[in-house]
Image (cartoon, helix red, strand yellow):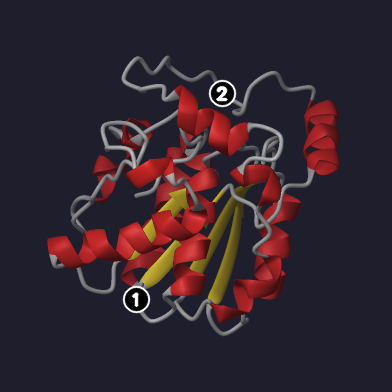
């Protein structure tokens, strides 16, 4: 499980919701290096590439073979980089509410069209367990940072693992069209696209029953 909002989030965003899948798999919650309770990388060398390689190293240390790697929002960036750099390593990928390249105009238009102040269509509880890391947040979110420079579009064809792309139809931060862009660059033989109606960022927050049913079916297929 790979969280998003690097520097502003950690693995706790998945708890306790993902406990509903414990009957079909072992769930491993991971804080990326420099985020949450993980140490900073050497020289604070934050990058999608390093995080992707760290994921392989982590799996090797934990003796995890062919993992199903789920990344939400910016965690999806890392999951895609991992699938691109290590195409034979994952068993499956789940890319949720994510994008392969920032499209500022599209996101602004989506916020305006939905008249939304928040990422979700239903009220969400506060998360006091999130640990803020200002240096990582700046490196990732600032103008000229990792998010703004990211462009994975032309490399998506290197992904070989079966991939579920999951989106909310009302996501203002990573609009559904971002997910469609990803789907169109992946081989049709490996990709499954699902959009959960009337949900936004991380659709299990607004409609957990449908979102988890989709993830469960994909994991078991």
Q: Which of marks 2 and 1 is nearer the N terminus?
A: 1
Residue 140 lies in quadrant? top right
| Residue 113 location (% of width, % of height) | 85, 31
| Residue 144 location (% of width, % of height) | 70, 40
Q: Is residue 92 above or below residue 198?
A: below
- Which disc is residue 122 wearing? 2
Q: How many discs appear?
A: 2
Few, some or many residues within 10 Å of mark 1 (<14, 14–19, 20+): some
Q: From where the camera sits, is residue 207 visible? A: yes
Q: Which of 90 and 38 is in front in this view?
A: 38
Q: Nearer the viewer, residue 45 or 169?
A: 45
Q: Nearer the viewer, residue 128 or 141?
A: 141
Residue indicated by mark 1: 89
Q: From where the camera sits, is residue 32 visible? A: no
Name the residue rendered at 72%, 44% in the picture. 175
- Which disc is residue 154 wearing? none
Few, some or many residues within 10 Å of mark 2 (<14, 14–19, 20+): few
């Amino acid at each position: 499980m790979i969280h998003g909002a690097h520097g502003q989030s950690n693995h706790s965003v998945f708890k306790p919701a993902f406990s509903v899948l414990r009957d079909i798999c072992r769930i491993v919650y991971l804080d990326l290096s420099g985020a949450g309770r993980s140490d900073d990388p050497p020289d604070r060398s934050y990058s999608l590439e390093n995080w992707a390689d760290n994921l392989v190293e982590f799996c090797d240390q934990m003796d995890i073979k062919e993992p199903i790697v789920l990344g939400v929002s910016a965690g999806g960036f890392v999951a895609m980089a991992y699938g691109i750099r290590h195409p034979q390593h994952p068993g499956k990928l789940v890319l949720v509410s994510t994008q392969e390249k920032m499209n500022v105009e599209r996101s602004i238009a989506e916020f305006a069209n939905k008249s939304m102040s928040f990422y979700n269509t239903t009220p969400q509880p506060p998360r006091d367990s999130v640990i803020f890391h200002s240096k990582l947040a700046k490196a990732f979110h600032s103008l000229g940072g990792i998010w703004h420079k990211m462009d994975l579009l032309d490399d998506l064809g290197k992904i070989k693992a079966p991939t579920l792309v999951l989106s909310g139809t009302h996501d203002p931060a990573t609009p559904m069209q971002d997910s469609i862009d990803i789907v169109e660059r992946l081989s049709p033989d490996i990709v499954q696209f699902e959009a959960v109606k009337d949900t936004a960022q991380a659709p299990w927050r607004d409609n957990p029953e449908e979102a988890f049913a989709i993830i469960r079916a994909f994991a078991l297929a």
